Amino acid sequence: MYKTCKDLENSLYVAPNEIRACCKRFFYEGKMRGDAKLLDINGNQSPKVSDIKKARQKVFDEIQENKNEDCKGCVFLREVKEKPNINSNISYLSVEHHSVCNLRCTYCSEIYWGGKRSKYNVVEFITYLSENRTLDNCDQVVWGGGEPTLDKSFEQISIDKTLVGEKYKLLSENLEVIITFMDERPISVELPKNVICTVESTDAVVKGQTAASSYKPAKLDNGINTTVPPFIESGEKIILDTRTLEYVKKVNS
């Protein structure tokens, strides 16, 4: 019988200063274990596929002899009759190569407040794995660790204003849009159906005027000009239809 697990056979975890087979953690015999390490990365040189295969084989052999401290007592280990192929292509890739974050979320760990940066070029490493067909069967990619956009290698896309016209004024930080590409070039941008805007200026409320009365001009905080019902005042938030740039309704505070 052989002891093995799915992670050892098919997973790869890219950490700031090491490559792991898993990120599971557990206590056994009074000690925190898990995070099964394959390789340390001491310099800026990315590991080779052959290095990863040798490391997997070493961990597997140590597990059979109950000598691997990371995996000792792990409930995810299973016994199989036939010797598994622990160097098959990767089907699960977890990218958690840095733990740098500029936020202070109360539910998160302090290790991300400052955090670690990778000692090697992760983009080059993953590209190398892909070119060597190691990721041909990879159907799951997970991004963990710190804030992705703080990584210098994080891909940013420049979009010409002409793709959205005046509606570019509706674009804001963290707004989710759908971008259509052709030959790796963005050719269209689809905004969400509605966005929330603040009325920067509009005429004062006229006593006796109702919603059924004619709308009045209003300038929004993003520079868009539209019309709003007479009861809308400056400083109030409204929902705007991104397709027509028309007022939809007032946002109740």
Image: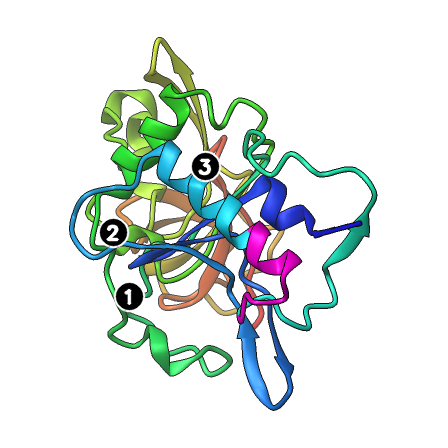
Determine if residue 202 is in view: no
Q: Is residue 253 magenta?
A: no
Along the line of sight, which residue is nearer the eye, 147 or 19? 19
- Amino acid marked by disc 3: Val
Q: Amino acid at mark 1?
A: Val
Callout 2: SS: loop
Circle 3: is it few (<14), some (14-19), or many (20+) Cα within 10 Å?
Answer: few
x 46%, y 77%: residue: 108
Structure colour scheme:
rainbow
Residue 45 or residue 184, whichever sits in front: 45
Q: Where 46 falls versus 24 (above or below)? A: above
Residues at marks 3 and 1 touching, judged by CB atoms closer than 8 Å = no
| Magenta region | 60-69
Viewer-proximal residue, 186 or 33?
A: 33
Mark pair 3, 2: CA separation: 21 Å
Place residue 18 in its image quadrant. bottom left
Whole-Å distance between the Cαs marked 2 and 1? 8 Å
Q: Earlier in the sequence, mark 3 or mark 2?
A: 2
Residue that mark 2 sits on: 151
Q: Residue furthest top?
A: 183
Decide: marks 2, 1 in contact (CB < 8 A)?
yes
Q: Residue furthest right?
A: 81
Label annotation for residue 251: none
**Residue picked out by circle 3:** 177
User: Which mark lies nearer to you, 3 or 2?
Assistant: 2
38 relative to 167, above or below: below
The answer to whether residue 245 is above or below residue 238 is above
Where in the figure is residue 84, as x and y percent of width and height? 70, 38
Nearer the observer: mark 3 or 1; the answer is 1
Q: Quadrant of the C terminus?
A: bottom right
| Residue bearing mark 1 | 100
